[in-house]
């Protein structure tokens, strides 16, 4: 799949972008480069290879070095909420924006 200049203009219009000729050309080259990469990946023979549910699955034989989950910052909730216009039960109250 390859995009032409009209495709780029349509995409830019949908995204509400104003691209000049050089920007449009650069964008087309970058997007087409991405499509070329996808095509190369699709051409790879993966027959007989079991899909992984997560990339870390490959590392199951190794121990992941994770730091301890420890609270390191003091709780400043009350201090931070002093300047709030409205607070209820430790939560900031804001105006309703969706009806």
Image: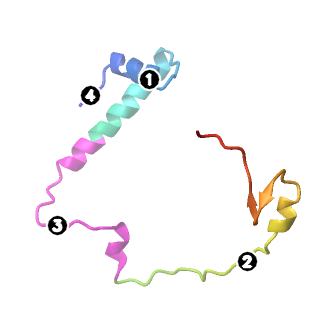
- For the N terminus, the image quarter is top left
| Mark sitting on residue 2 | 4
At which x and y percent is residue 10? Answer: 39, 19
- Check disc 4: other Cα within 10 Å, few if <14, some if 14-19, many if 20+: few
**Pointers 1 and 3 in contact (C-beta within 8 Å):** no
Q: Tell me the CA gap for discs 2 and 1.
A: 45 Å
Of tags 3 and 2, the one toward the viewer is 2
Residue position for label 3: 49
Image: 39 above or below 84? above
Q: Quadrant of residue 6?
A: top left
- Left or right: 55 with respect to 95? left
User: Residue visible at 16% across and 59% down?
Assistant: 46
At which x and y percent is residue 47? Answer: 11, 61
Residue position for label 1: 14
User: Helix, strand or loop at disc 4?
Assistant: loop
- Left or right: 1 with respect to 27? left
The magenta segment: 37-60
| Mark sitting on residue 37 | none
Q: First in sequence, mark 1 or 4: give its number.
A: 4
Q: Tell me the CA gap for discs 1 and 4.
A: 19 Å
User: Residue visible at 38% across and 26% down?
Assistant: 28
Q: First in sequence, mark 3 or 2: give its number.
A: 3
Residue position for label 2: 72
User: Helix, strand or loop at disc 1?
Assistant: helix
Foreground residue among 22 and 82: 82
């Amino acid at each position: 799949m390859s995009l032409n200049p009209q495709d780029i203009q349509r995409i830019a219009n949908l995204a509400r972008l104003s691209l000049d000729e050089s920007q449009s050309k650069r964008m087309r080259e970058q997007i087409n480069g991405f499509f070329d990469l996808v095509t190369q990946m699709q051409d790879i023979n993966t027959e007989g290879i079991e899909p992984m549910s997560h990339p870390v699955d490959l590392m199951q034989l190794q121990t992941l070095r994770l730091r301890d989950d420890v609270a390191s910052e003091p709780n400043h909730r009350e201090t931070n909420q002093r300047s709030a216009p409205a607070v209820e039960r430790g939560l900031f109250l804001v105006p309703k924006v969706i009806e």
